[in-house]
């Protein structure tokens, strides 16, 4: 059974472990900082109580920012990423946010395809943004508030 739940700081090891096995973006200290950031919520996508996806989401004024988004390698291409993204978009609409922003590495073709599917468009480039010198594409999805 699929479910989404908010992850608390006591589950920091779980976040660090999933990250280590996927994109290795943050150290444990960096994860701890994410939990402390104002307006930040961390959501886990679970199958039968096992976390297979993670998203770090921050609200800044009337914008939502996705600071981290990953699905466990074994569970990719099965619609789980889309499930988590659809949940986030609905959440942002309920909060009456105007747009969702995120950054993605220019070479990450799969993520680019994934985000295009949800109508994110490129609105800027941050040069040499990542440790390896690659550029980040700044993506934005405009939301229609009801
Ligand atoms: C990007 C990511 C979250 C997608 O998760 P997922 O669960 O595999 O995505 P879905 O199964 O819901 O796929 C939705 C769409 O994304 C695109 N997509 C996903 N995987 C793809 C692949 N391997 N090749 C091409 N397109 C792909 C397709 O358009 C797909 O739609 P389709 O199945 O109808 O073709 C996952 O690949 C991931 O965790 N990647 C590493 C982390 C990352 O790059 N995060 C984003 C930047 S921070």
Image (cartoon, rainbow, N blue to C red):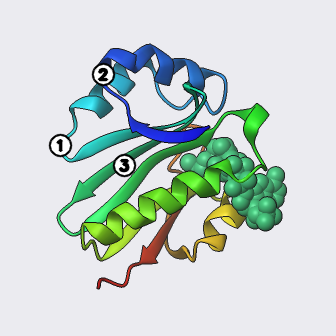
Q: In the drawing, does residue 9 fall left or right of residue 122?
A: left
Asked if 26 appears above or below 96 in the picture, the reply is: above
Asked if 26 appears above or below 144 in the picture, the reply is: above
At which x and y percent is residue 135?
58, 56
Asked if 127 appears above or below 4 in the picture, the reply is: below
Residue 67 in sight in this render: yes
Distance (Cα) linking label 3 and label 2:
14 Å
Q: Nearer the viewer, residue 106 or 57?
A: 57
Residue at position x 67%, y 62% from top? Answer: 114
N-terminal of the pair, mark 2 or mark 1, is 2
| Res. 57 mark | 3
Residue at position x 20%, y 47% from top? Answer: 39
Quarter of the view holding residue 73: top right
At which x and y percent is residue 134?
62, 50
Query: Which residue was labeled with disc 2?
Result: 9
In terms of secondary structure, where does tag 1 sit? loop
Ligand 1 within 8 angstroms of badge 3 C-beta? no
N-terminal of the pair, mark 3 or mark 1, is 1
Q: Nearer the viewer, residue 113 or 105?
A: 113
Distance (Cα) linking label 3 and label 1:
11 Å
For the C terminus, give its image quadrant: bottom left
Query: Which residue was labeled with disc 1?
Result: 38
Asked if 84 appears above or below 71 in the picture, the reply is: below
Q: Do the numbered discs 2 and 1 sit on residues whose CB atoms are within 8 Å?
A: no
């Amino acid at each position: 059974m699929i479910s989404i739940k908010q992850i608390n700081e006591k589950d920091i090891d779980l976040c660090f472990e999933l990250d280590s096995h996927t994109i290795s973006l943050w150290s444990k200290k960096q994860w701890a900082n994410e939990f402390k950031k104002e307006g930040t919520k961390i959501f886990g996508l679970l199958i039968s109580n096992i976390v297979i996806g993670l998203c770090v989401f921050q609200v800044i004024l009337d914008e939502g920012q996705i600071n981290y988004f990953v699905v466990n390698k074994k569970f990719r291409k099965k619609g789980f990423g889309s499930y988590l993204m659809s949940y986030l978009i609905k959440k942002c609409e309920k909060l009456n946010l105007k747009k969702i922003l995120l950054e993605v590495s220019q070479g990450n073709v799969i993520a680019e395809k994934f985000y295009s599917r949800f109508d994110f468009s490129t609105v800027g480039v941050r040069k040499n943004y990542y440790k390896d010198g690659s550029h980040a594409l700044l993506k934005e999805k405009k939301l229609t508030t009801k």
